[in-house]
Amino acid sequence: MITAQQAMPEFLSAAELHGLTGYARPGQQAQWLKEQGIPHKVDGRRVIVSRVHSRQWLEGRAVVISEGINFGAVK
C-alpha cells in the first residue's frame, strides 16, 4: 500500500516553490532560497528544490549539503 507521503513527488512544483518563496520569477526564487540556506539547483529557467530540504528548513533543522563521499574520513 502506498502512503500519501510516498506518492508525493521528490521536488516542489512551480506553484509550491512560488508559495514557499513568495516569488514567481526563477531568479528571485533562487536568490531567496540562497539567502535562506535552502539547497537548490537552477536548470535554465527552472529552479529545483527537494521536498526533503524544504521540510528540514521549515522544521528548523540544519540542511546538510552533501558534496559526495568524504574519503578522508574513511579508515
Image: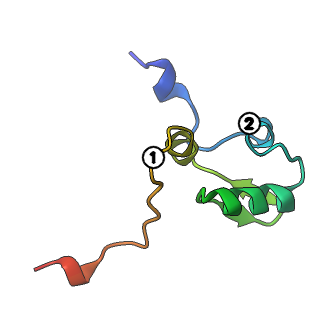
Q: Quadrant of the C terminus?
A: bottom left
Residue at left offset 53%, top offset 48%: 53
Residue at left offset 50%, top offset 19%: 4
Disc 1 crowd rating (10 Å Cα; few below 14, some 14-19, many 20+) is few
- Mark 2 and mark 1 lie on one chain; the one further toward the N terminus is 2
Q: Which one is in front, 59 or 71?
A: 59
Residue type at mark 2 is Glu
Q: CA distance from mark 2 to mark 1?
A: 20 Å
Query: Eyeballing the image, is 64 above or below 56?
Result: below
Name of the residue lying farthest toward the right: 25
Query: Eyeballing the image, is 43 above or below 54?
Result: below
Query: Eyeballing the image, is 37 above or below 70?
Result: above
Name of the residue lying farthest toward the front: 60
Foreground mark, 2 or 1? 1
Image-quadrant location for residue 34: bottom right
Residue type at mark 1 is Arg
Left or right relative to 32: residue 70 = left
Q: Quick one: SS at disc 1?
A: loop
Residue position marked by numbered label 1 in the rendering: 61
Left or right relative to 26: residue 52 = left
Q: Which one is in front, 71 or 60?
A: 60
Residue position marked by numbered label 2 in the rendering: 16
Residue at left offset 20%, top offset 78%: 73
Q: Quadrant of the N terminus?
A: top left
Residue 46 in the image: state x and y as whole percent: 78, 57
Residue 26 in the image: state x and y as whole percent: 84, 57
Q: Quick one: SS at disc 2?
A: helix
Q: Which one is in front, 57 or 44?
A: 57
Image-quadrant location for residue 68: bottom left
Q: Which one is in front, 42 or 64?
A: 64
